């Protein structure tokens, strides 16, 4: 055990310390506990991921006392270690590679014929660099946010007020569980062979350069994000989807645009299909996948299978020790105050089930903290803006066109590209990172749509495929919940050329008393 309370590591020092602990060159728990403070803890946060860290910061900022107990030697959780941050790195590379392949041999772009980009080298780049964000989280939490924490040691719940870690017992008025989730394994014969990856073991164990064919299992965010990257590297990529791809994009036109651009890139989407079994070579590595399709079983030679099948909440210890109630997918059931079925025990983040988004984890942590500190707030994650990556970013907020039609008597849509006989072969939308497409390959320059309830003139849905619109969607979603109308949207001040085009398009129609599609 190392007491680091009086040590004031720089971010650089933290990077070295964390690297040594991860790589096994150093051991032992790190205690950053304020022994001079004799107040009882308001909350112990078991798990220092996004939820635990943000909940702690909020509680501390409100004047409370908190302690984070985290098994890894860093705060921030799976997001910067093996989940969202590598997702984003890979997705940025997928977008870049798609641009380079589309522009191959034109302007200053190199000829990409036959070029296969390395997967392992990029994963190595990530592994080497990930201590950077880790170090910032530890530094910021200690030196700037004044949080107390114990790192690099697994906490054991003794009761609803007490956790033991590295031989010490800590007691608090409340316990906040933020134990995260783990990938659902591929349950088939050969599902545990070498060469079968998920987002965790890909980062931790990939030690060879995958061959020319990749099989991806799953049809939602994780599978699609990784699949698009593997495809963009220049490999044959087969998506094995047991039902339908990207069901979570409710607006069918947006979904179709996203899927069509994936297939344009050569991705093979095998819907209604399942992996039946995986075959191993003499070294115990996968060498073929038997895939049951609606047409029969196909054998595909591959040395690389990636499973993106969702996640299982790590709820076993609290269920066993405290008896907290669980849902059907192992998630801890909480109410709008993030309270579990056990008094004074809260749960946050991935542990409470979908959506398992880092931004939901952060927010749920802060709401638990506010409830603990006596605020009367309710956490309602029902109505949030969302996104995923293909080779593009797909962002959405509010209703799909289909949902809006079912709910309102008459709806108006404003789209780019518009519905014309030219289809997608027009040079708009065009903006950040789609300008070259607009001029040289117009149908790849994106798709966007807002949906308006004609009677109230309110914007009830917004959808976007392109780049750089997530920022706008954060604010747009808030404004839509406040009742944003086409008139108010058209009256905002835009910065030319913004990725969504929504303000200027709304302005073109806002003068109409009876709205028409555009
Ligand atoms: P998910 O959203 O739970 O989707 C699981 C996918 O795997 C679905 O397509 C599902 O098919 C399929 N599946 C599940 N069990 C299967 C089985 N036994 N055999 C074949 N297919 C199976 O999982 P995810 O995409 O891994 O995402 C996990 C969580 O992380 C989600 O909450 C997500 O929001 C979050 N995430 C977010 C991002 C982002 O960019 N915002 C990126 C990655 C992950 P069915 O549709 O047929 O059920
Ligand atoms: C780079 C980045 O913000 C991802 S790491 C975030 C971890 S935390 O701030 O604890 O949510």
Image (cartoon, rainbow, N blue to C red):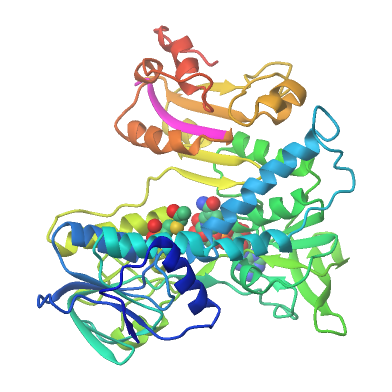
* Magenta region, main secondary structure: strand
Question: Can you see residue 304?
Answer: yes
Q: Residue at x 12, y 60 (%)?
A: 374
On the rendering, which quadrant does ligand 1 occupy?
bottom right
Q: Quadrant of the C terminus?
A: top right
Return the residue found at the far bottom: 167
Q: Residue at x 73, y 73 (%)?
A: 207
Left or right: 149 in relation to 154: left
Left or right: 52 in relation to 86: left
In reply to whether residue 320 is colored magenta, the answer given is no
Question: Can you see residue 336?
Answer: no
Closer-to-camera residue (305/420): 305
Q: Which residues are magenta?
A: 456-464
Which image quadrant is residue 82 in? Answer: bottom right
Q: Position of residue 323 (x, y in %)?
A: 31, 83
Q: Residue at x 59, y 70 (%)?
A: 200
Closer-to-camera residue (71/365): 71
As drawn, 97 above or below 190: above
Q: Position of residue 145 (x, y in %)?
A: 26, 59
Q: Quadrant of the N terminus?
A: bottom left
Q: Residue at x 57, y 28 (%)?
A: 448
Q: Position of residue 2 (x, y in %)?
A: 34, 83
Which image quadrant is residue 322 in? Answer: bottom left
Left or right: 68 in relation to 493: left
As drawn, 228 above or below 424: below
In reply to whether residue 461 is colored magenta, the answer given is yes
Q: Position of residue 154 (x, y in %)?
A: 39, 83
């Amino acid at each position: 055990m190392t007491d680091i309370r009086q040590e004031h590591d720089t971010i650089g020092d933290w990077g070295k310390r964390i690297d040594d602990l991860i790589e096994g060159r150093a051991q032992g728990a790190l205690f950053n506990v304020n022994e001079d403070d004799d107040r009882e803890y308001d909350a112990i946060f078991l798990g220092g991921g996004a939820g635990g860290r943000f909940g702690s910061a909020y509680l501390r900022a409100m004047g409370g006392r908190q302690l984070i107990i985290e098994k890894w030697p860093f705060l921030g959780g799976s997001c910067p270690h093996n989940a969202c941050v590598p997702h984003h790195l890979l997705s940025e590379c997928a977008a870049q590679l798609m641009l380079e392949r589309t522009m191959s041999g034109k302007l200053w772009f190199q000829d990409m014929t036959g070029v296969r980009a390395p997967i392992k080298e990029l994963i190595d780049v990530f592994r080497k660099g990930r201590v950077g964000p880790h170090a910032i989280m530890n530094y910021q939490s200690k030196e700037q946010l004044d949080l107390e924490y114990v790192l690099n040691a697994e906490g054991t719940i003794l009761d609803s007020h007490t956790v033991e870690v590295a031989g010490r017992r800590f007691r608090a008025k409340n316990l906040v569980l933020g134990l995260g989730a783990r990938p659902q394994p591929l349950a088939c014969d050969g599902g545990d062979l070498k060469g079968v990856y998920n987002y965790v073991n890909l980062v931790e164990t990939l030690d060879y350069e995958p061959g020319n064919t990749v099989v991806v299992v799953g049809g939602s965010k994780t599978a699609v994000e990784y699949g698009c990257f593997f495809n963009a590297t220049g490999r044959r990529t087969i998506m094995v989807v047991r039902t339908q791809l990207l069901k979570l994009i409710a607006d069918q036109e947006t979904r179709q645009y996203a899927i069509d651009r994936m297939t344009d890139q050569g991705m093979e989407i095998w819907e209604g299909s399942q992996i039946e079994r995986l075959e191993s070579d003499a070294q115990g590595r996968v060498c073929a996948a038997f895939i049951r399709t609606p047409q029969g079983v196909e054998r595909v030679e591959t040395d690389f299978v990636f499973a993106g099948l969702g996640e299982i909440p790590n709820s076993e210890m609290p269920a066993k020790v405290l008896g907290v109630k669980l849902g059907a997918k192992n998630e801890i059931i909480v109410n709008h105050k993030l309270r579990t079925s056990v008094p004074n025990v809260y749960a946050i983040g991935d542990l409470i089930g979908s959506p398992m988004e880092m931004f939901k984890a952060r927010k749920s942590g802060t709401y638990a903290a506010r409830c603990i500190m006596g605020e009367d707030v309710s956490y309602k994650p029902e109505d949030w803006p969302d996104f995923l990556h293909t080779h593009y970013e797909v962002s959405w907020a509010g209703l799909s066109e289909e949902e809006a039609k079912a709910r309102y008597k008459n709806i108006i849509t404003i789209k780019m590209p518009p519905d014309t006989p030219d289809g997608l072969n027009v040079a708009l939308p065009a903006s950040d990172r789609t300008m070259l497409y607009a001029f040289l390959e117009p149908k790849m320059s994106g798709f966007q749509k807002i949906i308006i309830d004609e009677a109230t003139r309110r914007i009830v849905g917004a959808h976007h495929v392109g780049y750089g619109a997530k920022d706008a969607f954060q604010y747009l979603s808030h404004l839509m919940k406040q009742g944003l109308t086409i008139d108010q949207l058209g009256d905002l001040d835009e910065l030319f050329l913004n990725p969504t085009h929504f303000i200027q398009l709304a302005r073109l129609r806002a003068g109409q008393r009876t709205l028409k599609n555009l």
